[in-house]
């Protein structure tokens, strides 16, 4: 349930964390992928339906959204199918794109059909990325004693550099 809600709020981070937890055997990877897929599909279907039912009224009351929506609609006019297949990679436009699609003549059935494949790819990709991070984390933890001295030197060096920078900035600001 947390994954379903988390996908709506901050998808990639939640799914990758769940994938990491699957690697730690706290969650099961196939359930993580399923929940991510279901949550992702639901999220963008809601945005599509909001665009369909409330889009014009919503945008007319928010002039700051009109410019973003206009850019998306111009893109949709030329490349409707490709935009639907690839909007998940358009950071900053992911919520607005299905919303804008809902305001067009694209049927809900077509949007769902075109959105299914990218949703599967997204869910599997970010779940496995989190799982892979768990693998990498295990490698570091197993050999952490080998790196403790170097990590300490790096932290001390970074702290010294930060302190020196602050002192130099203060000194030059006084002059």
Image (spheres, rainbow, N blue to C red):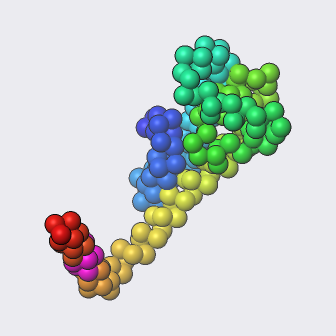
Q: Is residue 100 left or right of residue 24?
A: right
User: Residue extending furthest front?
Assistant: 175
Nearest the viewer among 58 and 112 is: 58
Q: Main secondary structure of the magenta part?
A: helix
Q: Residue at x 50, y 58 (%)?
A: 130
Tell me residue 41's x, y (percent). 63, 34
Q: Residue at x 64, y 46 (%)?
A: 90
Nearest the viewer among 84 and 144 is: 84
Q: Residue at x 47, y 49 (%)?
A: 13
Q: Eyeballing the image, is 143 above or below 71?
A: below
Rendered image quadrant of residue 129: bottom right
Q: Eyeballing the image, is 141 above or below 50?
A: below
Nearest the viewer among 1 and 90 is: 90
Q: Can the viewer see residue 43?
A: yes
Look at the image and tell me in which quarter the C terminus lies. Answer: bottom left
Rendered image quadrant of residue 35: top right
Tell me residue 142's x, y (percent). 37, 77
Q: Is residue 7 left or right of residue 159?
A: right
Q: Residue 157 colored magenta?
A: yes
Q: Residue at x 46, y 70 (%)?
A: 136
- Region rendered in magenta: 155-162
Q: Can the viewer see residue 22?
A: no
């Amino acid at each position: 349930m947390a994954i379903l809600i988390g996908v709506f709020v901050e998808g990639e981070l939640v799914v990758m964390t769940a994938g990491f937890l699957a690697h730690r055997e706290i969650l099961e990877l196939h359930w993580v992928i399923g929940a991510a897929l279901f949550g992702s599909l639901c999220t963008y279907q809601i945005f599509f339906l909001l665009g369909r039912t409330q889009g014009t009224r919503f945008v007319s009351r928010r002039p700051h959204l009109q410019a973003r929506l206009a850019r998306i609609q111009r893109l949709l006019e030329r490349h409707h199918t490709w935009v639907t297949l690839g909007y998940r990679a358009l950071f900053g436009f992911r919520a607005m794109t299905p919303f804008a699609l809902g305001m067009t003549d694209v049927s809900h059935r077509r949007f769902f059909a075109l959105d299914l494949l990218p949703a599967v790819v997204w869910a599997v990709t970010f779940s496995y990325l989190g799982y892979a991070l768990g693998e990498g984390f295990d490698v570091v933890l197993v050999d952490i004693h080998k790196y403790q001295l170097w990590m300490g030197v790096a932290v001390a060096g970074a702290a010294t550099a930060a302190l020196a920078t602050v002192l130099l900035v203060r000194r030059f600001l006084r002059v």
